[in-house]
Amino acid sequence: MKNDMKIFAGNANPVLAENICRYLELPLSKAEVRRFSDGEIFVEIGENVRGRDIFIIQPTCPPVNDNLMELMIIVDALRRASARRITAVLPYYGYARQDRKVAPRVPITAKVVAEMLMVVGVRRVLTMDLHAGQIQGFFNIPVDNLFAAPVLLDYINQNLPKDNVVMVSPDAGGVERTRAFAKRLNASLAIIDKRRERANECEAMSVIGDVKGKVAILLDDMVDTAGTLCSAAEVLTGAGALEVYACCSHGVLSGPAIERLEKSKIKSLVITDSVPLRGAAKECGKIKVLSVCSLLGEAIRRIHSEDSVSSLFV
């Protein structure tokens, strides 16, 4: 590995950043990121970065605006310090759900974030399981969208029931992802037909497919307030599923998510460490966290050495 790579991190997910550095056998570079008494963010880079290949690990998870602004200021500080190339490593891309106009006079905020990143000086983006693949087209710079599938599939194969399994998509938008998992697990496929009344609220209506007498594994890209997953689990149980498990790449877990999970029919929820657990989520016995540090670390290594990253897109 060349010696001109440096890894920086904001305050969004320091544990993941440290684990990625451990995988790469590199120290986390020095940067002071703090706030003034009025809440303004101050950043000072603590070492020479002139001509270096920089990677900033900063998922824009809750508090989204704080972490996003922190990332922008770190990028600006590095650009002004003459970094050769700046890659934003966003294990979780905030505002990804606002990827199109769903009503008159509403923004496409995922596009706004993309433009902000490019304007401030980001020259490449490494992310994971974007809510919508078309977000890559919002950028005029290279975007690598990794998938947590290898990590989740390995866990499912080793820890969840293998016989009589049905993979379930909680909505029509996740069918392609769920079908790919079902094929690799040699499982059947089912879909939850739902109607979303308002943001973060949904009403699960019916099950398309046979789940009676089977172990159901719900698959989604993220779990936020857990309304979708918990409603889906209720419907699956009512349709005759023996047990219900859930797997998601990003465990945002905001609002009433933990309370809902504790009361739900979901036996366990498997997520990755793209978003750090906060508050009551750390104490929830139903949640299992898998690390994606090796996946992201290997992608960083290959981007830096100009090797192919395509084999990681499983």
Image: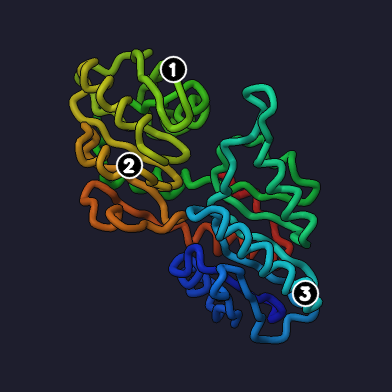
The N terminus, quarter of image: bottom right
SS at badge 3 = loop
Residue type (three-letter) at the residue carrying disc 1:
Arg
Tag 2 secondary structure:
helix
Identify which residue is drawn at 73% across, 53% down.
Answer: 116
Question: What separation in Å lies between label 2 and label 1 (alpha carbons)?
Answer: 19 Å
- Residue 157 in view, yes or no: no
Q: Position of residue 220 (x, y in %)?
A: 43, 35
Residue 282 located left or right of residue 149: left
Mark 2 vs mark 1: which is more N-terminal? 1
Disc 3 target residue: 83
State the residue position of label 2: 257
Instruction: Evaluate if marks 3 and 2 touch, with contact meaning CB atoms under 8 Å apart.
Output: no
157 vs 172, left or right, is left
Query: Quadrant of residue 259 in the image?
Result: top left
Q: Quadrant of residue 119?
A: bottom right
